[in-house]
Amino acid sequence: MALNVSSRLTRSIVRVLASRSVNPVTRRLATTSCRTYLRCLQHIRVIRYDGTSLRSFSSSSQPSVDVSNEQLKKLLLSESSVVIDVREPWELREYGNIPGSINVPLGQVNSALQLKPDEFKEKYGGDMPSHSQNIVFSCLAGVRSKTALETAVSLGYTKVQHYPGGWQEWAERQLIKTKE
């Protein structure tokens, strides 16, 4: 009985996958020991994906999620992206901030990205990014910015990135430049 249900379930799964451009391939069991234990199952189903269905998930047209220090500087100069610092306000007062960034603490990112543009501007002092605009999240060391990125993606934002070096790398690079 259980094998009959399992067999029907396997056939159903293969049919569903086949309808999604997946090609089922049937192979006979190779070893004798397998045949001994699985007498009722004379065939197993192996799923082979055609190249196009896998290739569509690894498209290189998508920008990288991580932004380097140099890329961030270019984005800030061109004003083509909105840089959101997700640290707490006291951290910005104590350590400093990336010029041109908007402070939206991590705990408020979800609600902030759902505000009306005028409410966002009033509360955070910068223009609210649109769903198609490039957003770069930053924090102290790249941990909270990754969480903010995931939150933005869950809200439908498509061009989101994060600066993994965070304020620590930014300050370090700026300090090196001022010493030179």
Image (cartoon, rainbow, N blue to C red):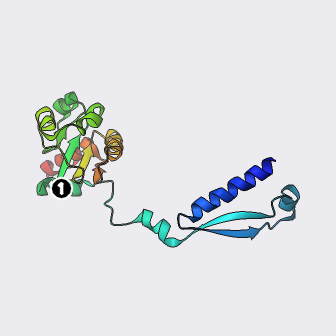
In the rendered structure, the answer to whether residue 119 lies left or right of residue 88 reads: left
Residue 176 in the image, given as x and y percentages of width and height: 19, 49
* In-front residue for pair 9/27: 9
Residue named by callout 1:
75
* In-front residue for pair 132/19: 19
Number of marks present in the image shown? 1
In the rendered structure, the answer to whether residue 30 lies left or right of residue 126 reads: right
Q: Is residue 90 visible?
A: yes
Residue occupying image coordinates x 31% and y 48%:
156
Residue 56 in the image, given as x and y percentages of width and height: 43, 66
Residue 61 in the image, given as x and y percentages of width and height: 33, 66
Amino acid carrying label 1: it is Leu
Residue occupying image coordinates x 21% and y 42%:
84
Q: Secondary structure at mark 1?
A: helix
* In-front residue for pair 130/146: 130
Residue occupying image coordinates x 31% and y 42%:
145
Residue occupying image coordinates x 67% and y 70%:
25
Badge 1: residue crowd in 10 Å (few <14, some 14–19, many ≥20): some
